[in-house]
Image (cartoon, rainbow, N blue to C red):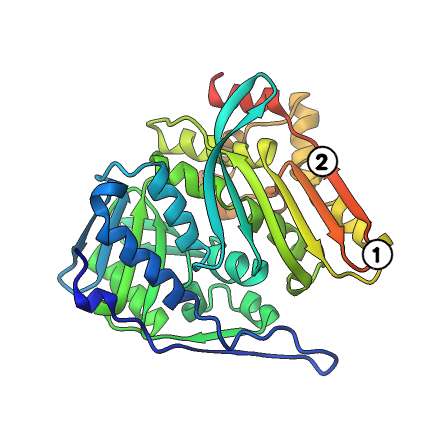
Amino acid sequence: MVSDENLIYACSRNCSKSTAEEPKVTVAQISLNKSALRLVNKLCAEADRYKVSFEKTPLGATLVDAGLNAEGGFLAGELVTEICLGGYGSAKVMPIQYGDVALPSVFVLTDHAALSTLASQFAGWQIKTEGFSAIASGPARALALKPKHLYEKLGFLEESDIAVLVLETEQKPPEAAIKLIVDKCGVTPKNLFLIMFSTTSVVGATQVSGRIVETGLHKLERLGLDPLIVKSAWGYAPIVPRHPSSGEAMGRTNDAILYGGVTNYTVNYEDDTQLENIVKQAPSSASKAMQEARQLAEKNPRFLQLFKEAGFDFYKIDPDIFAPAIIVVNNLKTGKTFRAGNLDVEVMKESLGL
């Protein structure tokens, strides 16, 4: 069971910034860290069910192993994906047919698209200390403002005594990494909750595919769409078969989104012509780097190839590549729906060894 100390929620306050023209968003009732902590408590309270384990570090932080030494699984993957979303989205694993192959896939939906995906789920914090590295996501990013410009654009500020962070890594964080995180988030170690897993785990594969809506919205935002006009969003992507190599697993999980991911967004947008142009540029196949790689290989490249060319540094890859295979946007202002992109089942099957 989880101790009473773990069940204490932070007293959080959120506020929003606004422009002179129009208030951006009202978030006074939303606390991403508080909402995510409820799910962390559930994960720990039912550790046997979810095949996870948890422990206290010497500094007092709580580490939840969801896929390093612990086995984890699809149920844990669903819950960890929802933790990444700050508790403001849902994730469900189900079978979906891709050509002649059926694969377990994660279906994600949210009615708080900008906050749950960009303010929480986006893997926008690279944590590095001597001998340790991790890709960090989850609501604690909102406390550390990683990256700051994104939170300024969202007009979102959260103050919380509790921090919940999700780490994609191959080892437990050392005390130096924990100290770095609590310093950036402004919390005490005993109020820090870290969920960790390897890319090679079931949880790792599930939560990467569970970023499908976030990946598409981040691409739309880069193309000029205000994420705050998105009213609701859903999407799905296949969960790839496991591989013992972290590099191969990283390649497979990203191929699942690039070639097998589908997203749908409902927005309020004034100009259909502009919106249609944004959508056309949004799928993974539209990125310049992808087009150049496709010309050289005479087919869509595997993500692993791009990963190798970037020196296996996730943050050195052209960010425009990160997008779903298909993006659909419905405009509430006019009722029109725009769609761009296509699935590439053959490249995805090659990536998965099928």
* Percent position of residue 119, x then y: 51, 63
* Residue at 68% across, 63% down: 229
- Could you tell me residue 201's position as x and y percent? 33, 35
Cα separation, mark 1 vs mark 2, equals: 22 Å
As drawn, 203 above or below 146: above
Query: Which amino acid type is marked by label 1?
Result: Thr
> Looking at the picture, how far across and down is residue 293, in whole percent?
65, 30
At 82% across and 49% down in the image, what residue appears?
Answer: 336
Residue 313 appearing in the image: no
- Name the residue that disc number 1 marks: 334
Quadrant in the picture for residue 98: top right
Frontmost residue, 102 versus 228: 102
Residue at the (56%, 68%) spot, across then down: 149
* Mark 2 lies on residue: 341
Q: Position of residue 144 (x, y in %)?
A: 41, 69
Which badge, 1 or 2, comes first in the chain's sequence?
1
In this view of the protein, can residue 228 be seen by the observer? yes
The single residue placed furthest to the bottom in the displayed view is 20
